[in-house]
Amino acid sequence: MKGGKRHVVYDMNNRAAYKETSTTQKRKAVALISGGLDSMLATRLVMELGIHVEGINFFTGFCVEGHTHAIRKKDKTKPKRNNALWVAEQLGIKLHIVDVIEPYKSVVLNPKHGYGANMNPCLDCKGFMVGKAYEWIKENDFDFIITGEVMGQRPMSQRKDTMPVIQRESGAGDLLLRPLCAKKLPPTLPEREGWIDREKLLDLHGRSRKPQMALAEKYGFKDYAQPAGGCCFLTDANYTRKLTDLWGNRGTRDYELDDIMLLKVGRHLRPRSHFKLIISREEGESRFLEGYRKEFVHLKTISHGGPLALIDGDVNDNDLQLAARLVARYSQGRDADAVEIAIVDKQGISKNVTVNPIAVEDIPGDWIL
Amino acid sequence: MSTHHLDARRLLCPMPVIKTQDTIKNLNNGDILSVVCTDPGAEHDIPAWCRINGHKVLDINHANHDITISIEVNGLGSTPSS
């Protein structure tokens, strides 16, 4: 143990155990960094109070990232940055990015507290992430956890009645500090022990973003991601519809990373319940989908410029004919009488067919996911 | 010092960053890691991750659609001027 006055800290997670610490030892916190403004501000505030902070970011597979879209030409003007990394760099802190794809499945598939407006299990998600951060601080000898939560900001996970649920269910207890609204909450261990001055913490609440924007200006933060932390595809109605379709037609609510990645890319059409087409919209998407050509039958226009399409499902010759006509519709030969299409199986064996592009009016709206 | 290779092609960010991070955890100071990616976002994210974690990006090469990033472990985070 380092020098300085010794005192005893109550360990919330093992009420029978006590941990000896030193008042001269610099306290360490891990901050959940989403890439949005609130966690950035919360971290900056705590750093200002003399705490060593490192960031942690969890990759669930459903995270919205600018560069996921960077494979599309139309998004090339957007910065191709991971916002969590950008935030960490602005703050001058380390960032640990943790792959939680597998354990996160239970949150998505069986959320104890249910879903929000779409398939977003926000309350379970926050509890899960704080729980993972709690595991991390124990493994890495850090003292407490910071989040950018603001009471009343979000309808599920950031309410007065649900914020204690996160503390309880994550196991973090009062090792979880929410600096932006701490004064609205009972003092946590870092406050009670004097590791940080509660008076310097904030009492933000409600949905207004003005206090955060003012604080960002004070700290000189510009070009931060908007809106704060809106970072999950599960809150997106279109994405949720495609995920629900996937499960409904597979007959099982499960997924692999490739499944949920493919839902982010291309135009999805389900002309029959037993198969779906994923049709690229840009050259970048075609290149990305090409990476799956050993796992899916794929189609590519030969006579005209056009997309690459994957077929998800087992198909017969009639299905392939329909798929080819649909792909032709989305090619540069859409107005031609005949478009030549290569149909390539998973072994790479190709056969060419010539089809008449399907008319727009023959594509029922409910085929388009 | 030894040279290591990581194939992160087809992975979308942040998976190339996570794979790089997890590989570097097991390397020694001065080792070189060569990461091959296809997500254009990796070209920005891996150097950003290196900068904040104290590793040095030695070189970034493009060949067809592959992006190869060479990293010196614990090379103190500077990046090559381009």
Image (cartoon, coloured by chain):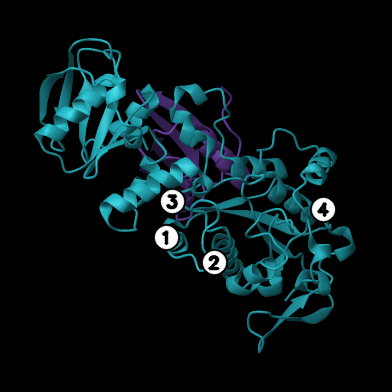
Chain colours: A cyan, B purple
**Residue A78 visible in image:** yes
**Which quadrant of the structure image shows residue A21?**
bottom right
Residue denoted by label 1: A105
Q: Quadrant of residue A124?
A: bottom right
Q: Nearer the viewer, mark 4 or mark 2?
A: 2
Q: Is the residue at mark 3 from the same chain as the one at mark 1? A: no
Mark closer to the chain start, 1 or 4: 4
The residue located at (56%, 42%) in the rendering is: B50
Residue indicated by mark 4: A48
Q: Give the residue type at disc 1.
A: Lys
Q: Are marks 4 and 2 on the same chain?
A: yes
Q: Kindly report the distance in space between the C-alpha atoms of the residues bearing marks 2 and 1.
A: 15 Å
Q: Residue furthest bottom?
A: A16
Q: Position of residue A197 (x, y in %)?
A: 87, 64
**Is the C terminus of chain B in the top left, top right, bottom left or bottom right quadrant?**
top right
Q: CA distance from mark 3 to mark 1?
A: 24 Å
Secondary element at tag 4 = helix
Labels 3 and 1 touching (C-beta < 8 A): no
Relative to A298, B65 lies left or right: right
- Distance CA(mark 2)–CA(mark 3): 36 Å
Q: Which residue is mark 2?
A: A113
Q: Position of residue A73 (x, y in %)?
A: 46, 22
The amino acid sitting under disc 4 is: Glu
The residue identified by callout 3 is: B23
- Give the Cα separation between the discs numbered 3 and 4: 33 Å
